[in-house]
Amino acid sequence: MLNLIRRDVILQKRQLLIFIPFILFFIIIDVYPALTFLVASIFIPFNTYAYDEKAETNILLNSLPYTRTEIIASRYLGAIVYMVLAIGVTSLALFAFNKPFTMTDIAIGSSLFLLFAAFTFPLFYIFKPGYITTVVLISFALLTWIARPIASFIAKHLTAITDFIVNLSVPALYTGATLVIVIVYAISWGITTVIYQRKAF
């Protein structure tokens, strides 16, 4: 399984040359740090999916001595590994450019990435090749566009929920959010595994 994760890095070595300038562009135009961490985290995993979609890599992967469960596990575990690496590189870049950021920015960026990955990874095995990347890009654009209006709506109209959240202590809030994200990610992992095991290549 570790070799499958390394495979993604090897396949993306050219794209990694674009990664640093891409992140630097977001930093220079002074994008909110949490969004910069989110975009940086998305870069490698979703580029890998786009490459595999184009090259129909799943046919090759299923001819190798890996189970379908291991293939999906490498995707989900790899996404976490790349997220950690991307956050590290982005943090160094922000520090080098003297751009302030906090652990909250990292927490928000990584949380949004894991939620976005949880909702979109199954789509790569539901939709036909050729449409997946488009669906994911549109989904990402829609999520970033509607996130603030949804948050405003909840704050204004669902006061019981917002009052409950406001009254929580910071440790309880972080613990609860982490637990929800882990559960959603685990459910997504399970759903994707089932879909992939039943899919014919």
Image (cartoon, grey):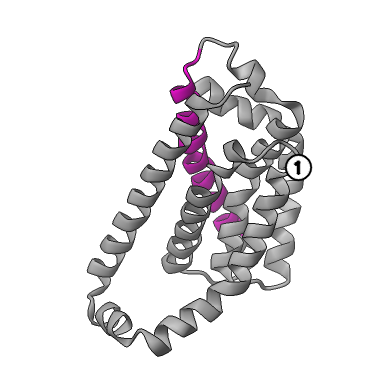
Q: Find residue 165 and report its image quarter.
A: bottom left
Residue 14 higher or lower than 21, as above or below: above
Residue 108 higher or lower than 127, as above or below: below
Image coordinates of residue 197 in percent, x first then y, are 48, 25
Residue corresponding to mark 1: 17
Name the quarter where the C terminus is drawn: top right
Magenta-colored segment: predominant secondary structure: helix
Give the residues in magenta: 66-93
Mark 1: which amino acid?
Leu
Between 192 and 18, the residue placed more toward the observer is 192
Kind of element beneath mark 1: helix
- Residue lying at 77% horizontally and 35% vertically, measured from the top left: 14
Q: Is residue 26 visible?
A: yes
Q: Find residue 143 and report its image quarter.
A: bottom right
Image coordinates of residue 94 in percent, x first then y, are 60, 63
Image coordinates of residue 18 in percent, x first then y, are 76, 46
- Residue lying at 52% horizontally and 34% vertically, measured from the top left: 75
- Residue lying at 68% horizontally and 44% vertically, measured from the top left: 132
Between 126 and 47, the residue placed more toward the observer is 126
Between 139 and 198, the residue placed more toward the observer is 198
Residue 17 higher or lower than 175, as above or below: above
Is residue 184 inside the magenta stretch? no
Image coordinates of residue 150 in percent, x first then y, are 50, 77
- Residue lying at 57% horizontally and 11% vertically, measured from the top left: 64
